[in-house]
Image (tube, rainbow, N blue to C red):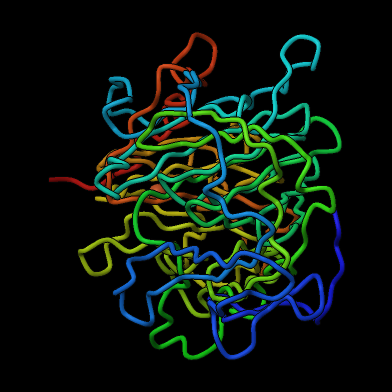
Amino acid sequence: MTETRMEPLLSGFGNHFASEAVPGALPVGRNSPQRAPHGLYAELFSATAFTAPRAENRRSWLYRRQPSVVVGGYTPLALPLWKTGVASGASAAPDPLRWHPVPVPDTAEAPLDFIDGLRTVVVAGDADAQTGMSAHLVLINRSMTQRALVNADGEMLLLPQSGRFTVTTELGVLQASPGDVLLLPRGLAFKVAVDGPATAYVCENFGAAFRLPELGPIGSNGLANPRDFIAPAAAFDADAVDRPYQIVKKFGGEFWVAAQAHSPFNVVAWHGNLAPMKYDTRHFNTIGSISFDHPDPSIFTVLTSPSDTPGTANVDFVIFPPRWLVAEDTFRPPWFHRNLMSEFMGLVYGQYDAKPEGFRPGGASLHNSMVPHGPDAEAFERASNAALAPHKLDHTLAFMFESRWRMRPTAWALRPGAQDTQYAECWAGLRSHFQGQP
Ligand code: FE2
């Protein structure tokens, strides 16, 4: 893989970038000249309709050794643990659900790359209707070598939970570790390499592409700042022409596989605003109360995929990063609540303040639409009686995929032993303290 960086860092969410791994590979002043430079093929890669409004439009021009269309016939591939759409979910009672972390098996026991190791936990919406999302766990013990994945159903947001990830895409290479987020556009070919056992949470988004949320009265800075999103520089396989690849395509919830005589990672130069991006959550400018009450958790939104109802997201990606708690006369953990929105949560590392026990790194929880939840009895007692000095929640990263759509757990998620069956007991100690008289 050639990783020549010809220009400074490509940064800025949604920016228009230009990158070439070989000087002169990008045409100047036009996208599709009669002959593209260096004998390359020009190919347009669009994640939006051609006529999408300018602010929404995402597309890039790729200059590559052979176009993506050069691939053999696709045949079906069975990936029974990767589910799509609410209809593929199981029936589950409207209780809060919580899952134990899942260990990565030995390679000898089960060789798992990013594709084979993906397990869907919850499903929502419908990929063909371009609505909804899925939340997955990925257990990886080997790298993809001459195998690439193209997901035509949605973009994929990866949160490494353990291990180090090197993600090679058509547009270049990005590396990520726990604390980082990778956003991979719908339809982009990529492969994932790891340097040992690795796990990640994944949000597969079938709806509108993730974008930064509006800031309203917060102003022009804050939360995730655009400049902290990094795109890769153009890079390509030096031996791309003679390198057979297996291309796995996800298409309407089904999987297909084809042999290709060359590497899909043969893009020598590209320009445009559709690109994979990396974001380090340690750059999140966390905003909270400096008087009383904590704001709604929407204050922690990193990225949002809007739906057609204003303010009601197809899916929001929300983090609970390290932060100071300083509010006076305030119950500081998340309050008890129930909401229209469905909440899938995970813990990348550290401890989550509303559930100091039980919610473990690598685990997950689901609080579906209108399912009540809140701090456990221990957290409630402690927070109700704590001296309210400034306190820092540190070395922690929890996150939430929050959606307007009801989430159904999969049969895999409900398999014996997977769930924390004691979860509801964490609230059993919340007895009545009321001493008033009617
Ligand atoms: Fe909640």
Judge whether 111 appears above or below 369 on screen: above
Can the viewer see residue 127? yes
362 or 201: nearer the eye?
201
How many callouts does the rendering have? 0
Residue at image coords 72%, 66%: 232
Q: Residue furthest front?
A: 34
Residue at image coords 47%, 66%: 330
Residue 293, given in percent of the width and then of the height, sits at: 43, 69
Can the viewer see residue 281? no
Quarter holding residue 356: top right
Q: Is residue 11 shown left or right of residue 34? A: right
396 or 52: nearer the eye?
52
Quadrant location, the C terminus: top left
Residue 39, given in percent of the width and then of the height, sits at: 70, 68
Residue 265, given in percent of the width and then of the height, sits at: 70, 51
Judge whether 328 appears above or below 182 on screen: below
Residue 15, given in percent of the width and then of the height, sits at: 57, 80
Residue at image coords 52%, 21%: 420
Residue at image coords 32%, 20%: 90
207 or 327: nearer the eye?
207
Q: Residue furthest left?
A: 438
Judge whether 176 appears above or below 80 on screen: below
